[in-house]
Amino acid sequence: MKDLAERLTVDVPKKIDELKAQGGPNEADQQRARLAWEKITKDGKPLMFGGDDVKAEELYVELVYGLAVTAFNRGGVKFFGLNWEAVK
């Protein structure tokens, strides 16, 4: 998998823009982000340490989604030294 931080700098802003286009995250987006964080904290080893590329990519998609939704919270979100803050 390409460098995680490098990929996030491209993909999280894209997802934030998609969420902005729909008026910001709705309740379903918030719920999906909560489930994404649960999945990542429970099963995130392939994402962080490699191994199963298919599982890692699935987790990556959830990570991007979770970061983008969380970026709409006050103060935004910081991850791997990167910061995203979005406004509706």
Image (cartoon, rainbow, N blue to C red):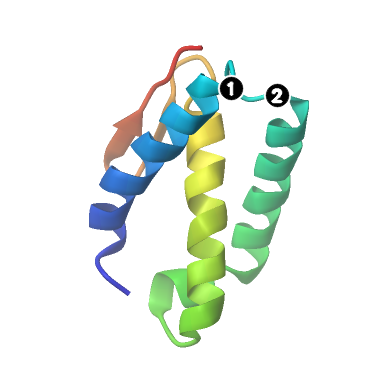
| Residue at 51% across, 52% down | 63
Percent from the top left, x then y, of residue 78? 38, 35
Which quarter of the image is occupied by the N terminus? bottom left
Horizontal side of 32 relative to 75 (left or right) equals: right
Percent from the top left, x then y, of residue 2? 26, 70
**Mark number displayed over residue 26:** 2
Helix, strand or loop at disc 2?
loop
Mark pair 1, 2: CA separation: 9 Å
Q: Is residue 72 visible?
A: no
In the rendered image, which residue does mark 1 sit on? 22
Helix, strand or loop at disc 1?
loop
Percent from the top left, x then y, of residue 8? 33, 50
Label 1 or label 2, whichever lies nearer to me, is 1
The disc labelled 1 sits on which kind of residue?
Answer: Gln
Horizontal side of 23 relative to 60 (left or right) equals: right
Label 1 close to label 2 by CB (< 8 Å) = yes
